Image: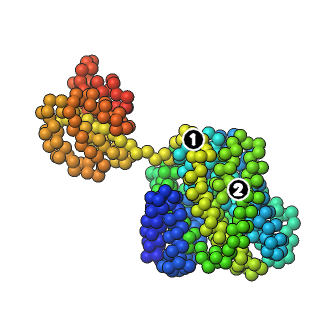
Amino acid sequence: MLQGAIVALMVGLLTGRAAKGCGIPGLLGMLLAGVLLGPYGLGWMDPQLLELSGDIRMLALTIILLRAGLGLDKQKILGQGSTALLLGIIPCTMEAAVLAVTAHYTLGWSWVVAWLFGWVICAESPAVLVPMMLRLKSQGWGAKSGLPDLVLAGGALSDVVAITVFGIVLNMASGPTNLGLAAVGAIPLRVAAGLLVGFLAGRLLVGLLARTELVEGSTQAAVLTLGGVVAIVLLGDRLGYSGYLAAMTAGFAIIDTDEVLARRIRGELERVWVVAEVFLFVLIGAEVNIPMVAEAGSIGVLLLAMGLFLGRLPGILLATAGSTLSTKEKLFMGVGYLAKATVQAAIGAIPLSMGIPNGELILAFAVLAIVITAPLGAVGTSLLAPLLLERGEVDPTKVTVETKYRFLVALDPRGAALRALEEAARLARQTDATLLIVHADQNGQTARMVTALYDSIRHLISDIEHDLIIVDGVPADSIIELAAASAVDVVFMGKSKTEMASPSMDGVTPKVLELSTVPVVVVEAV
Protein backbone atom coordinates (compact mmCIF):
# COMPACT_ATOMS: atom_id res chain seq x y z
CA MET A 1 0.00 0.00 0.00
CA LEU A 2 2.87 2.37 0.82
CA GLN A 3 4.37 1.76 -2.60
CA GLY A 4 0.98 2.37 -4.21
CA ALA A 5 0.58 5.62 -2.28
CA ILE A 6 4.03 6.82 -3.38
CA VAL A 7 3.27 5.96 -7.02
CA ALA A 8 -0.08 7.76 -6.83
CA LEU A 9 1.57 10.82 -5.27
CA MET A 10 4.42 11.00 -7.78
CA VAL A 11 2.28 10.40 -10.86
CA GLY A 12 -0.38 12.82 -9.57
CA LEU A 13 2.20 15.55 -8.95
CA LEU A 14 3.76 15.09 -12.39
CA THR A 15 0.47 15.04 -14.30
CA GLY A 16 -0.78 18.00 -12.28
CA ARG A 17 2.33 19.97 -13.15
CA ALA A 18 2.02 18.95 -16.80
CA ALA A 19 -1.58 20.15 -16.86
CA LYS A 20 -0.57 23.52 -15.43
CA GLY A 21 2.15 23.75 -18.05
CA CYS A 22 -0.54 23.38 -20.72
CA GLY A 23 -2.53 26.24 -19.18
CA ILE A 24 -5.29 24.12 -17.58
CA PRO A 25 -5.96 23.47 -13.87
CA GLY A 26 -3.63 20.93 -12.31
CA LEU A 27 -6.48 18.93 -10.80
CA LEU A 28 -7.43 17.72 -14.30
CA GLY A 29 -4.04 16.08 -14.62
CA MET A 30 -4.50 14.50 -11.19
CA LEU A 31 -7.92 13.16 -12.16
CA LEU A 32 -6.42 11.68 -15.30
CA ALA A 33 -3.67 10.06 -13.23
CA GLY A 34 -6.34 8.42 -11.08
CA VAL A 35 -8.18 7.10 -14.14
CA LEU A 36 -4.97 5.64 -15.57
CA LEU A 37 -3.76 4.10 -12.30
CA GLY A 38 -7.18 2.93 -11.11
CA PRO A 39 -8.90 -0.44 -11.53
CA TYR A 40 -10.61 0.68 -14.75
CA GLY A 41 -7.30 1.83 -16.26
CA LEU A 42 -3.91 0.16 -15.87
CA GLY A 43 -4.82 -1.32 -12.49
CA TRP A 44 -1.61 -0.17 -10.83
CA MET A 45 -3.25 1.26 -7.73
CA ASP A 46 -3.00 -0.96 -4.67
CA PRO A 47 -6.38 -2.41 -3.62
CA GLN A 48 -5.66 -1.58 0.04
CA LEU A 49 -5.22 2.08 -0.90
CA LEU A 50 -8.57 2.00 -2.69
CA GLU A 51 -10.19 0.52 0.41
CA LEU A 52 -8.93 3.49 2.42
CA SER A 53 -9.83 6.02 -0.27
CA GLY A 54 -12.98 7.09 1.58
CA ASP A 55 -11.03 7.97 4.71
CA ILE A 56 -8.29 9.71 2.73
CA ARG A 57 -10.83 11.76 0.80
CA MET A 58 -12.54 12.68 4.08
CA LEU A 59 -9.25 13.97 5.50
CA ALA A 60 -8.46 15.94 2.35
CA LEU A 61 -11.95 17.47 2.29
CA THR A 62 -11.65 18.41 5.94
CA ILE A 63 -8.39 20.22 5.22
CA ILE A 64 -9.81 22.19 2.31
CA LEU A 65 -13.04 23.10 4.14
CA LEU A 66 -11.08 24.21 7.20
CA ARG A 67 -8.92 26.35 4.92
CA ALA A 68 -12.06 27.83 3.38
CA GLY A 69 -13.46 28.69 6.80
CA LEU A 70 -10.17 30.30 7.81
CA GLY A 71 -10.54 32.64 4.83
CA LEU A 72 -14.22 33.59 5.00
CA ASP A 73 -14.96 37.29 5.21
CA LYS A 74 -17.84 37.86 7.63
CA GLN A 75 -18.49 41.41 6.45
CA LYS A 76 -18.81 40.36 2.80
CA ILE A 77 -21.27 37.58 3.66
CA LEU A 78 -23.35 39.77 5.99
CA GLY A 79 -23.35 42.49 3.34
CA GLN A 80 -25.34 40.21 1.02
CA GLY A 81 -27.99 39.46 3.63
CA SER A 82 -29.72 36.11 3.13
CA THR A 83 -28.21 35.44 -0.29
CA ALA A 84 -25.82 32.76 1.00
CA LEU A 85 -28.71 30.94 2.66
CA LEU A 86 -30.81 31.06 -0.50
CA LEU A 87 -27.87 29.89 -2.62
CA GLY A 88 -27.57 26.88 -0.36
CA ILE A 89 -31.21 25.85 -0.84
CA ILE A 90 -32.80 27.06 -4.09
CA PRO A 91 -30.35 26.10 -6.89
CA CYS A 92 -29.74 22.52 -5.73
CA THR A 93 -33.46 21.96 -5.07
CA MET A 94 -34.45 23.24 -8.51
CA GLU A 95 -31.75 21.17 -10.21
CA ALA A 96 -32.84 18.04 -8.31
CA ALA A 97 -36.46 18.71 -9.28
CA VAL A 98 -35.66 19.10 -12.99
CA LEU A 99 -33.57 15.92 -12.93
CA ALA A 100 -36.30 13.98 -11.09
CA VAL A 101 -39.09 15.09 -13.44
CA THR A 102 -36.97 14.36 -16.52
CA ALA A 103 -35.93 10.91 -15.26
CA HIS A 104 -39.52 10.03 -14.35
CA TYR A 105 -41.02 10.92 -17.74
CA THR A 106 -38.16 9.96 -20.08
CA LEU A 107 -36.77 6.88 -18.32
CA GLY A 108 -39.98 5.69 -16.70
CA TRP A 109 -38.51 5.60 -13.19
CA SER A 110 -40.73 5.79 -10.13
CA TRP A 111 -40.95 9.16 -8.45
CA VAL A 112 -38.96 8.00 -5.43
CA VAL A 113 -36.07 6.63 -7.52
CA ALA A 114 -36.16 9.69 -9.79
CA TRP A 115 -35.86 12.04 -6.80
CA LEU A 116 -33.07 9.87 -5.40
CA PHE A 117 -31.22 10.35 -8.68
CA GLY A 118 -31.84 14.12 -8.58
CA TRP A 119 -30.34 14.52 -5.09
CA VAL A 120 -27.29 12.43 -6.02
CA ILE A 121 -26.48 14.61 -9.01
CA CYS A 122 -27.39 18.11 -7.76
CA ALA A 123 -24.68 18.45 -5.08
CA GLU A 124 -21.63 20.61 -5.87
CA SER A 125 -18.12 19.31 -5.34
CA PRO A 126 -16.25 21.03 -2.49
CA ALA A 127 -13.08 19.34 -3.74
CA VAL A 128 -13.25 21.44 -6.92
CA LEU A 129 -15.26 24.43 -5.72
CA VAL A 130 -13.22 25.37 -2.65
CA PRO A 131 -9.73 25.41 -4.26
CA MET A 132 -11.08 27.41 -7.19
CA MET A 133 -12.74 30.00 -4.95
CA LEU A 134 -9.68 30.30 -2.73
CA ARG A 135 -7.59 30.90 -5.83
CA LEU A 136 -9.98 33.65 -6.94
CA LYS A 137 -9.73 35.25 -3.50
CA SER A 138 -5.93 35.20 -3.65
CA GLN A 139 -6.07 36.89 -7.08
CA GLY A 140 -8.68 39.47 -6.13
CA TRP A 141 -11.42 38.35 -8.57
CA GLY A 142 -14.85 39.24 -7.19
CA ALA A 143 -13.23 40.77 -4.11
CA LYS A 144 -15.45 43.86 -4.01
CA SER A 145 -18.77 41.97 -3.95
CA GLY A 146 -17.44 39.07 -1.90
CA LEU A 147 -18.54 36.56 -4.55
CA PRO A 148 -16.03 33.83 -3.61
CA ASP A 149 -17.17 33.99 0.03
CA LEU A 150 -20.82 33.71 -1.02
CA VAL A 151 -20.10 30.74 -3.27
CA LEU A 152 -18.16 28.99 -0.51
CA ALA A 153 -20.86 29.53 2.12
CA GLY A 154 -23.72 28.64 -0.23
CA GLY A 155 -21.89 25.58 -1.56
CA ALA A 156 -21.26 24.16 1.91
CA LEU A 157 -24.92 24.59 2.85
CA SER A 158 -26.08 23.16 -0.49
CA ASP A 159 -24.16 19.94 0.07
CA VAL A 160 -25.71 19.58 3.52
CA VAL A 161 -29.20 19.94 2.02
CA ALA A 162 -28.47 17.50 -0.83
CA ILE A 163 -26.93 14.79 1.35
CA THR A 164 -29.60 15.10 4.04
CA VAL A 165 -32.54 14.91 1.62
CA PHE A 166 -30.79 12.07 -0.21
CA GLY A 167 -30.79 10.11 3.04
CA ILE A 168 -34.50 10.78 3.56
CA VAL A 169 -35.44 9.71 0.02
CA LEU A 170 -33.15 6.68 0.31
CA ASN A 171 -35.18 5.50 3.32
CA MET A 172 -38.35 5.94 1.29
CA ALA A 173 -36.89 3.98 -1.63
CA SER A 174 -35.65 1.10 0.50
CA GLY A 175 -38.96 0.39 2.23
CA PRO A 176 -42.04 1.90 3.86
CA THR A 177 -41.14 4.33 6.60
CA ASN A 178 -42.91 6.90 8.69
CA LEU A 179 -40.87 9.94 7.75
CA GLY A 180 -43.39 12.74 7.81
CA LEU A 181 -42.51 16.26 8.84
CA ALA A 182 -39.94 15.07 11.35
CA ALA A 183 -37.63 13.87 8.59
CA VAL A 184 -38.03 17.08 6.60
CA GLY A 185 -37.33 19.04 9.77
CA ALA A 186 -34.01 17.21 10.08
CA ILE A 187 -32.51 19.48 7.43
CA PRO A 188 -32.56 22.79 9.36
CA LEU A 189 -31.73 20.93 12.57
CA ARG A 190 -28.71 19.30 10.92
CA VAL A 191 -27.56 22.65 9.55
CA ALA A 192 -28.09 24.52 12.82
CA ALA A 193 -26.34 21.80 14.82
CA GLY A 194 -23.40 21.82 12.41
CA LEU A 195 -23.04 25.59 12.72
CA LEU A 196 -23.24 25.45 16.51
CA VAL A 197 -20.78 22.56 16.90
CA GLY A 198 -18.31 24.15 14.49
CA PHE A 199 -18.51 27.54 16.17
CA LEU A 200 -18.01 26.10 19.67
CA ALA A 201 -15.16 23.87 18.45
CA GLY A 202 -13.42 26.85 16.84
CA ARG A 203 -13.72 28.95 19.99
CA LEU A 204 -12.46 26.05 22.11
CA LEU A 205 -9.44 25.56 19.84
CA VAL A 206 -8.58 29.24 20.09
CA GLY A 207 -8.74 29.00 23.85
CA LEU A 208 -6.45 25.98 23.86
CA LEU A 209 -3.94 27.34 21.38
CA ALA A 210 -3.81 31.08 21.90
CA ARG A 211 -4.33 31.30 25.62
CA THR A 212 -2.31 28.33 26.87
CA GLU A 213 1.17 26.93 26.35
CA LEU A 214 -0.18 23.70 24.94
CA VAL A 215 1.79 23.96 21.67
CA GLU A 216 4.94 25.61 20.42
CA GLY A 217 4.88 27.02 16.90
CA SER A 218 2.45 27.17 14.01
CA THR A 219 2.99 23.57 12.89
CA GLN A 220 1.86 22.09 16.20
CA ALA A 221 -1.10 24.48 16.30
CA ALA A 222 -2.17 23.38 12.80
CA VAL A 223 -1.83 19.68 13.69
CA LEU A 224 -3.94 20.06 16.83
CA THR A 225 -6.54 22.14 14.99
CA LEU A 226 -6.80 19.65 12.13
CA GLY A 227 -7.09 16.76 14.58
CA GLY A 228 -9.90 18.49 16.45
CA VAL A 229 -11.80 19.33 13.27
CA VAL A 230 -11.43 15.78 11.92
CA ALA A 231 -12.95 14.57 15.19
CA ILE A 232 -16.05 16.76 14.81
CA VAL A 233 -16.42 15.62 11.17
CA LEU A 234 -16.33 11.97 12.23
CA LEU A 235 -18.87 12.60 14.99
CA GLY A 236 -21.26 14.34 12.60
CA ASP A 237 -23.05 11.25 11.31
CA ARG A 238 -23.34 9.73 14.77
CA LEU A 239 -24.74 12.83 16.45
CA GLY A 240 -26.90 14.05 13.57
CA TYR A 241 -25.19 17.27 12.47
CA SER A 242 -23.31 18.19 9.30
CA GLY A 243 -19.66 17.44 9.98
CA TYR A 244 -18.33 19.19 6.87
CA LEU A 245 -20.34 22.33 7.58
CA ALA A 246 -18.99 22.21 11.14
CA ALA A 247 -15.44 22.00 9.74
CA MET A 248 -15.84 25.18 7.73
CA THR A 249 -17.61 26.93 10.62
CA ALA A 250 -14.76 26.01 12.99
CA GLY A 251 -12.30 27.74 10.67
CA PHE A 252 -14.57 30.78 10.50
CA ALA A 253 -14.82 30.90 14.31
CA ILE A 254 -11.02 30.82 14.59
CA ILE A 255 -10.44 33.71 12.18
CA ASP A 256 -13.29 35.68 13.74
CA THR A 257 -11.71 35.27 17.19
CA ASP A 258 -7.95 35.42 16.52
CA GLU A 259 -6.79 36.50 13.06
CA VAL A 260 -3.11 36.04 13.91
CA LEU A 261 -3.62 32.42 14.91
CA ALA A 262 -5.84 31.86 11.86
CA ARG A 263 -3.14 33.16 9.51
CA ARG A 264 -0.51 30.85 11.00
CA ILE A 265 -2.74 27.79 10.84
CA ARG A 266 -3.83 28.65 7.31
CA GLY A 267 -0.22 28.88 6.17
CA GLU A 268 0.62 25.44 7.56
CA LEU A 269 -2.52 23.86 6.08
CA GLU A 270 -1.64 25.21 2.65
CA ARG A 271 1.60 23.22 2.78
CA VAL A 272 -0.30 20.08 3.79
CA TRP A 273 -2.81 20.68 1.00
CA VAL A 274 -0.09 20.25 -1.64
CA VAL A 275 -0.04 16.53 -0.81
CA ALA A 276 -3.69 16.16 0.22
CA GLU A 277 -4.89 17.66 -3.08
CA VAL A 278 -3.01 15.04 -5.09
CA PHE A 279 -4.48 12.13 -3.15
CA LEU A 280 -7.98 13.61 -3.25
CA PHE A 281 -8.19 14.01 -7.02
CA VAL A 282 -6.20 10.90 -7.90
CA LEU A 283 -8.54 8.80 -5.75
CA ILE A 284 -11.61 10.49 -7.25
CA GLY A 285 -10.23 9.71 -10.70
CA ALA A 286 -9.73 6.09 -9.67
CA GLU A 287 -13.48 5.85 -9.05
CA VAL A 288 -14.26 6.66 -12.69
CA ASN A 289 -15.67 3.54 -14.36
CA ILE A 290 -15.05 4.05 -18.08
CA PRO A 291 -17.43 1.28 -19.28
CA MET A 292 -20.15 2.70 -17.05
CA VAL A 293 -19.59 6.20 -18.46
CA ALA A 294 -20.07 4.77 -21.95
CA GLU A 295 -23.24 3.04 -20.77
CA ALA A 296 -24.69 6.33 -19.50
CA GLY A 297 -24.23 7.68 -23.02
CA SER A 298 -25.97 10.65 -24.60
CA ILE A 299 -29.05 10.40 -22.37
CA GLY A 300 -26.84 11.13 -19.38
CA VAL A 301 -25.37 14.21 -21.07
CA LEU A 302 -28.90 15.42 -21.90
CA LEU A 303 -30.05 14.95 -18.29
CA LEU A 304 -27.05 16.85 -16.94
CA ALA A 305 -27.59 19.71 -19.41
CA MET A 306 -31.27 20.01 -18.52
CA GLY A 307 -30.48 20.01 -14.81
CA LEU A 308 -27.99 22.82 -15.34
CA PHE A 309 -29.88 25.08 -17.74
CA LEU A 310 -33.45 24.49 -16.50
CA GLY A 311 -32.70 24.05 -12.80
CA ARG A 312 -29.31 25.24 -11.58
CA LEU A 313 -28.98 28.53 -13.49
CA PRO A 314 -32.58 29.72 -12.92
CA GLY A 315 -32.15 28.75 -9.27
CA ILE A 316 -29.04 30.90 -8.95
CA LEU A 317 -30.80 33.85 -10.59
CA LEU A 318 -33.75 33.44 -8.24
CA ALA A 319 -31.56 33.11 -5.12
CA THR A 320 -29.54 36.22 -6.01
CA ALA A 321 -32.49 38.35 -7.21
CA GLY A 322 -32.31 40.65 -4.20
CA SER A 323 -28.52 40.86 -4.03
CA THR A 324 -26.12 43.50 -5.30
CA LEU A 325 -24.36 41.02 -7.60
CA SER A 326 -24.10 41.95 -11.26
CA THR A 327 -25.55 39.82 -14.05
CA LYS A 328 -22.05 38.68 -15.02
CA GLU A 329 -21.33 37.61 -11.45
CA LYS A 330 -24.56 35.63 -11.32
CA LEU A 331 -23.69 33.87 -14.56
CA PHE A 332 -20.24 33.11 -13.21
CA MET A 333 -21.83 31.40 -10.23
CA GLY A 334 -23.43 28.97 -12.65
CA VAL A 335 -19.96 27.93 -13.74
CA GLY A 336 -18.61 27.93 -10.20
CA TYR A 337 -21.36 25.60 -9.00
CA LEU A 338 -21.08 23.36 -12.08
CA ALA A 339 -18.42 20.92 -10.88
CA LYS A 340 -19.55 17.62 -9.39
CA ALA A 341 -17.14 15.04 -8.01
CA THR A 342 -16.80 14.46 -4.29
CA VAL A 343 -20.40 13.92 -3.22
CA GLN A 344 -21.22 11.88 -6.31
CA ALA A 345 -18.20 9.64 -5.68
CA ALA A 346 -19.27 9.21 -2.05
CA ILE A 347 -22.98 8.44 -2.46
CA GLY A 348 -23.44 7.50 -6.12
CA ALA A 349 -23.00 3.78 -5.49
CA ILE A 350 -25.26 3.59 -2.40
CA PRO A 351 -28.55 2.98 -4.28
CA LEU A 352 -26.91 0.10 -6.19
CA SER A 353 -25.45 -1.44 -3.02
CA MET A 354 -28.91 -1.34 -1.37
CA GLY A 355 -30.65 -2.98 -4.33
CA ILE A 356 -32.63 0.11 -5.33
CA PRO A 357 -34.18 -0.27 -8.81
CA ASN A 358 -32.05 1.39 -11.52
CA GLY A 359 -29.20 1.81 -9.01
CA GLU A 360 -26.65 0.82 -11.64
CA LEU A 361 -27.82 3.60 -13.96
CA ILE A 362 -27.79 6.13 -11.12
CA LEU A 363 -24.15 5.23 -10.50
CA ALA A 364 -23.39 5.46 -14.23
CA PHE A 365 -24.92 8.94 -14.41
CA ALA A 366 -23.01 9.98 -11.26
CA VAL A 367 -19.72 8.87 -12.82
CA LEU A 368 -20.59 10.65 -16.05
CA ALA A 369 -21.31 13.82 -14.06
CA ILE A 370 -17.84 13.63 -12.51
CA VAL A 371 -16.10 13.09 -15.85
CA ILE A 372 -17.90 15.96 -17.59
CA THR A 373 -18.54 18.63 -14.98
CA ALA A 374 -15.38 18.48 -12.84
CA PRO A 375 -13.10 19.48 -15.76
CA LEU A 376 -15.64 21.99 -17.12
CA GLY A 377 -16.11 23.62 -13.74
CA ALA A 378 -12.39 23.85 -13.06
CA VAL A 379 -11.41 25.14 -16.48
CA GLY A 380 -14.46 27.40 -16.81
CA THR A 381 -13.80 29.07 -13.46
CA SER A 382 -10.22 29.87 -14.42
CA LEU A 383 -11.02 31.10 -17.93
CA LEU A 384 -14.18 33.10 -17.21
CA ALA A 385 -13.08 34.88 -14.03
CA PRO A 386 -11.17 37.61 -15.94
CA LEU A 387 -14.12 38.02 -18.35
CA LEU A 388 -17.06 38.12 -15.91
CA LEU A 389 -15.61 39.38 -12.62
CA GLU A 390 -14.10 42.64 -11.47
CA ARG A 391 -10.68 42.49 -9.89
CA GLY A 392 -10.30 44.17 -6.51
CA GLU A 393 -7.70 44.38 -3.80
CA VAL A 394 -6.63 41.15 -2.18
CA ASP A 395 -7.25 41.00 1.55
CA PRO A 396 -4.05 39.47 3.01
CA THR A 397 -5.81 38.82 6.33
CA LYS A 398 -8.14 36.29 4.67
CA VAL A 399 -5.86 34.51 2.19
CA THR A 400 -2.17 33.77 1.96
CA VAL A 401 -0.73 35.99 -0.75
CA GLU A 402 2.18 34.31 -2.48
CA THR A 403 4.85 36.92 -3.15
CA LYS A 404 8.36 36.35 -4.43
CA TYR A 405 10.56 38.88 -2.64
CA ARG A 406 13.73 40.39 -4.06
CA PHE A 407 16.29 42.02 -1.78
CA LEU A 408 19.17 44.20 -2.97
CA VAL A 409 22.32 44.28 -0.86
CA ALA A 410 25.03 46.86 -1.51
CA LEU A 411 28.38 45.08 -1.05
CA ASP A 412 31.76 46.63 -0.48
CA PRO A 413 34.78 45.57 1.63
CA ARG A 414 33.53 47.35 4.75
CA GLY A 415 32.37 45.44 7.80
CA ALA A 416 29.06 47.35 7.75
CA ALA A 417 28.25 45.98 4.29
CA LEU A 418 28.90 42.42 5.46
CA ARG A 419 26.52 42.96 8.38
CA ALA A 420 23.88 44.17 5.91
CA LEU A 421 24.41 41.00 3.84
CA GLU A 422 24.03 38.81 6.93
CA GLU A 423 20.75 40.49 7.85
CA ALA A 424 19.40 40.29 4.30
CA ALA A 425 20.36 36.60 4.13
CA ARG A 426 18.60 35.89 7.42
CA LEU A 427 15.35 37.42 6.17
CA ALA A 428 15.76 35.83 2.72
CA ARG A 429 15.82 32.37 4.28
CA GLN A 430 12.58 33.08 6.14
CA THR A 431 10.77 34.46 3.08
CA ASP A 432 12.49 32.42 0.34
CA ALA A 433 13.63 35.68 -1.25
CA THR A 434 16.18 36.30 -4.01
CA LEU A 435 19.27 38.39 -3.25
CA LEU A 436 20.79 40.85 -5.71
CA ILE A 437 24.29 41.57 -4.40
CA VAL A 438 25.40 44.81 -6.03
CA HIS A 439 28.72 46.63 -6.14
CA ALA A 440 29.25 49.88 -8.02
CA ASP A 441 32.90 50.36 -9.08
CA GLN A 442 33.17 54.03 -9.86
CA ASN A 443 36.94 54.21 -10.44
CA GLY A 444 37.61 50.67 -11.67
CA GLN A 445 39.69 49.85 -8.58
CA THR A 446 37.43 47.88 -6.22
CA ALA A 447 35.73 45.28 -8.41
CA ARG A 448 38.52 42.70 -8.01
CA MET A 449 38.58 43.18 -4.24
CA VAL A 450 34.80 42.76 -3.95
CA THR A 451 34.84 39.66 -6.19
CA ALA A 452 37.47 38.06 -3.95
CA LEU A 453 35.39 38.98 -0.90
CA TYR A 454 32.30 37.40 -2.49
CA ASP A 455 34.22 34.19 -3.25
CA SER A 456 35.27 33.95 0.39
CA ILE A 457 31.74 34.35 1.78
CA ARG A 458 29.71 32.65 -0.97
CA HIS A 459 29.39 29.43 1.05
CA LEU A 460 27.46 31.39 3.71
CA ILE A 461 24.65 32.15 1.24
CA SER A 462 24.85 29.03 -0.94
CA ASP A 463 21.31 27.99 0.09
CA ILE A 464 19.83 31.30 -1.12
CA GLU A 465 19.10 32.17 -4.73
CA HIS A 466 21.36 35.13 -5.48
CA ASP A 467 23.34 37.00 -8.15
CA LEU A 468 26.44 39.16 -7.90
CA ILE A 469 26.15 42.27 -10.08
CA ILE A 470 29.10 44.63 -10.57
CA VAL A 471 28.35 47.86 -12.42
CA ASP A 472 30.30 50.95 -13.42
CA GLY A 473 29.02 54.21 -12.06
CA VAL A 474 28.38 56.37 -9.06
CA PRO A 475 27.53 53.97 -6.20
CA ALA A 476 24.44 55.70 -4.80
CA ASP A 477 22.94 56.44 -8.22
CA SER A 478 23.65 52.93 -9.50
CA ILE A 479 22.04 51.31 -6.45
CA ILE A 480 18.92 53.48 -6.71
CA GLU A 481 18.50 52.87 -10.46
CA LEU A 482 19.10 49.11 -10.21
CA ALA A 483 16.65 48.77 -7.32
CA ALA A 484 13.90 50.46 -9.32
CA ALA A 485 14.65 48.59 -12.56
CA SER A 486 14.80 45.16 -10.87
CA ALA A 487 11.52 45.50 -8.95
CA VAL A 488 13.36 45.14 -5.66
CA ASP A 489 11.24 45.07 -2.50
CA VAL A 490 13.88 46.19 0.02
CA VAL A 491 17.40 47.63 -0.20
CA PHE A 492 19.87 46.66 2.52
CA MET A 493 22.71 49.07 3.21
CA GLY A 494 25.52 48.95 5.72
CA LYS A 495 26.69 51.96 7.69
CA SER A 496 29.51 52.39 10.13
CA LYS A 497 29.10 53.92 13.57
CA THR A 498 30.97 56.99 12.37
CA GLU A 499 28.50 57.49 9.51
CA MET A 500 25.57 57.00 11.85
CA ALA A 501 26.83 59.69 14.18
CA SER A 502 27.58 62.17 11.41
CA PRO A 503 24.86 64.68 10.44
CA SER A 504 26.33 64.89 6.92
CA MET A 505 24.45 63.27 4.03
CA ASP A 506 27.53 62.97 1.77
CA GLY A 507 28.03 59.19 2.09
CA VAL A 508 26.55 56.46 -0.15
CA THR A 509 24.19 55.05 2.46
CA PRO A 510 22.69 58.41 3.52
CA LYS A 511 22.15 59.38 -0.12
CA VAL A 512 20.38 56.12 -0.97
CA LEU A 513 18.32 56.46 2.19
CA GLU A 514 17.27 59.95 1.16
CA LEU A 515 16.55 59.44 -2.54
CA SER A 516 15.45 55.82 -3.01
CA THR A 517 11.79 55.14 -3.79
CA VAL A 518 12.31 51.57 -2.57
CA PRO A 519 12.29 50.96 1.21
CA VAL A 520 15.83 50.95 2.64
CA VAL A 521 17.03 49.01 5.68
CA VAL A 522 20.21 50.42 7.21
CA VAL A 523 22.30 47.95 9.20
CA GLU A 524 24.89 49.41 11.52
CA ALA A 525 28.25 47.69 11.94
CA VAL A 526 28.90 46.13 15.33
Image point (24%, 48%), residue name? 460
**In the displayed structure, would residue 365 be above or below residue 401?**
below
Give the side of residue 433 with respect to residue 292, left or right. Answer: left
The x and y percentages for residue 465 are 30, 49
Q: Which residue is mark 2?
A: 157
The x and y percentages for residue 311 are 76, 58
Q: Which residue is mark 1?
A: 391
The x and y percentages for residue 486 are 34, 38
**In the displayed structure, would residue 221 be above or below residue 260?**
below
Cα separation between marks 2 and 1: 26 Å
Tell me whether circle 2 and circle 1 mark residues in contact (CB < 8 Å). no
- Secondary structure category for the residue under label 1: loop
Give the side of residue 238 with respect to residue 24, left or right. Answer: right
**In the displayed structure, would residue 324 be above or below residue 133?**
above
Q: What is the residue that sits farthest to the top in this orientation?
A: 503
- Secondary structure category for the residue under label 2: helix
Image point (37%, 31%), residue name? 518
Using the rendered image of the protein, determine whether residue 298 is visible from the camera's viewpoint.
yes
Instruction: Specify the amino acid type for callout 1.
Output: Arg
Image point (19%, 43%), residue name? 454
